[in-house]
Image: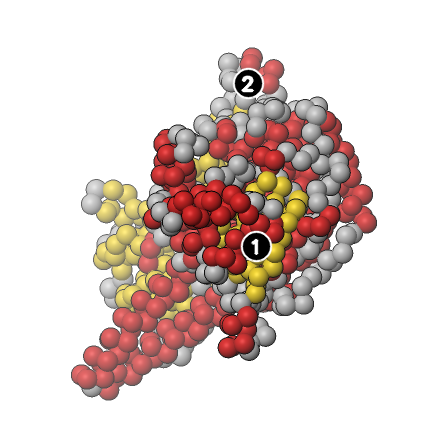
Amino acid sequence: MSQHMNFDQVMPTFVAECREVVQEMEDGLLSIPTTQDLPETIDAIFRAAHTLKGSAGLFDITQIVSFTHVVETVLDEVRNTRLPMSDGLVALLLSCCDHIKALVEGVAAGRLEPDEALAQSGAPLTLQLQRYADSVGTPATQASEIWRDSAAGPPGDAPDPEGDRWHISLRFGRNLLRNGLDPISFLRYLGTLGAVTGMVTLHDASGLVEEMDPESCFLGFEIAFKSSADKATIESAFDFVRDDCRIAILPPRSRISEYVRLIQELPEETARLGEILTRCGSVTAHELEVALHAQSGAVPGQRIGTILIQQGVVQPTVVDAAIARQTQLKESRTQEAGSIRVDAHKLDRLINLVGELIIAAARADLVGRRTANAELQECTSVLSGLVQEVRDSALQLRMVKIAATFNRFQRVVHDVSRELGKDIGLVVAGEETELDKTVVEKISDPLMHLVRNAIDHGIEPAELRAARGKPAKGTVRLNAYHDSGSIVIEVGDDGGGLKRDKILAKAVERGLVEPGRTLADRDIYALIFEPGFSTADQVTNLSGRGVGMDVVKRNITALRGHVDVASEEGVGTTVTVRMPLTLAIINGFLVGLGSSVFVIPLDMIDECVEFTAEARHDYTNLRGQVLPFIRLRDVFEVGARSARRESIVVVNCAGRRTGLVVDTLLGEFQTVIKPLAKVFNQVKCIAGSTILGNGEVALILDVPALVEQRRLAAREPMPSRSSKPARQAAPTT
């Protein structure tokens, strides 16, 4: 490791980028069966492996460089169509991705030296890769020496064709060392692509004397380089410094005119550069002298593409394609330059501060209204508007696309289906749907279990699917979309569906359902979320122990979410998960019950109407439609006398409209969600709390839980030891 490089500062970025690149490799491998452009997909996988090797080479992490070199060799054979990308090779390369992840995580944990245990686990993979390479006669051995002294000449066992010699002109920027990079590491990595047969080191003596800055870089190199790699591969060795240095690469068999153009474009004196190129062995002194005299600087004014076409080296279409590709890469780099990485805890801290700002702004607004000062009220109104914009912007920073979570399941479906001997594909929709990163992190495990459950229990064996007239290949579907201020995630399959009668019989056997009781399909399917419930005939590595689905529901409920199941035997099953978009700040609507104040999420409210129901009825007529309602006073046992004029807040939960009867409507309120203490974990129908402008606490209603409770209460109640129905404790503020 170079002493110039601040390892502690750059290592987190290196690890994060390695994880992303490995994920790109994995995504590319998983997309091979369905891709419309197989060559481009394979090229993308190869570029990812090459980038990973190059990044590790800069840090001298030999265990990653050596292993990815073997992977890259095999991928190069696939890219050149000398080796087919079979299912077996895809599975092997996915295992290689897992091993690379383990190597990267080892580096992240501070283990920079080769780990013996990881080396042993990677040895079988290397052997299998070698067999694939041997099948086309390509040695997939690890890279040899980093680079050789120019006096040593080419290695004796290496081919020495004249056409393999490249010339690289390199001038590093002044800030190279300040950016934590080592110029020698680039040359060291270049040696993994071939052999340096000649090299002259240049230094800017005048700059060194004038600046006298030990942190500035004053180095340049003229390099004669033997390699069978293409120009793009050689250029990629300098990806990290492309924007902060001057690089020129002349391909083998280049015309002398191109060397002349190079000399005239570089800052050094022509005579000195001519001597340097001669010392490298790239051109002879006689050739250079004749070319300089003949061309007299005519070439520098011409573009490279035009020169190549005129010299007959390439066709115009090739140049056009290269220019288009270069433009695409430039735009991609520009887009990447427009984004920065921010630690998650910094975003969390920002959201917490914004929450406190909202509470303070609400307090200021209340004081302004109490004092009846028009100027103060105007100021607090402007302040509230700005705070709301800051809130929306801060929350947007934490919003991430669910695509990354969905793509992770491609590997799960691939591996589990192979383990079970099933042919299953994953169909994803709604990848662009955004939600809070905290929700993404906490929903991943429940979704993982639902996907694995769909593969194991849902999709039937191929013989049974054929007997039912279904395609041999099963399908698992993932979909996400926004609805009423929530995100809805659907996990479906086209398998055999849930066996209604078998679930009901098992529930009766366990005492969960009274014998002879009639239940709707939805209620029966909900029984699969009971702890320990399973109808599997045998226990496997994946399922059958009755553990998992209850945890799924518990985790989703803890996030103020709701899970529902719809199934048709022989057709398939769909599990629908409804979650809030964010767990931090929401738009709320304040309602009053006696002296207590509650908050209803504004996105779930359709309208507010006057209470007009008849006595002893739990429904009302809303423009010709029956609207069931819930008396919150009864739910929370608020003892104060009812107001003369009550109101109904019409909420929409999962497509079902329900009314909430309240005493007073207090208006909208920016609600900062504060979690309840652990002692209140068992309190139902409450999702959290918030602080009002006057400093009092208001409880946030869990609308899905209220609606579900009413739905269950509307059916025949189960026998109870107590004749008096259980009530919720009255909240106090």
Report the amino acid beneath label 1: Ile
The reply, left or right, for residue 316 in relation to residue 135 is left
Tell me what residue is drawn at x 41 percent, y 71 percent: 355
Tell me what residue is drawn at x 24 percent, y 80 percent: 379
Return the residue at label 1: 276
Residue 216 to residue 201: above or below = below
Q: Is residue 392 visible?
A: yes
Tell me what residue is drawn at x 33 percent, y 55 percent: 603
Viewer-side residue, 688 vs 458:
458
The reply, left or right, for residue 692 in relation to residue 136 is left
Residue 50 at x, y = what percent?
Answer: 59, 43
Secondary structure found at label 2: loop
* Mark 2 or 1, closer to the camera: 1
Tell me what residue is drawn at x 66 percent, y 53 percent: 188
Viewer-side residue, 210 vs 677:
210
Viewer-side residue, 249 vs 621:
249
Secondary structure found at label 1: helix
Report the amino acid beneath label 2: Ala
Q: Indicate the quadrant where residue 125 lies.
A: top right
Q: Is residue 513 visible?
A: no
Residue 535 at x, y = what percent?
Answer: 64, 32
Mark 1 crowd level (few <14, some 14–19, many ≥20, 10 Å Cα): many
Q: Which corner quadrant holds the N terminus?
A: bottom right
Return the residue at label 2: 472
What's the CA distance linking mark 2 and mark 1? 67 Å
Residue 482 at x, y = what percent?
Answer: 37, 47
Q: Which corner quadrant holds the C terminus?
A: bottom left
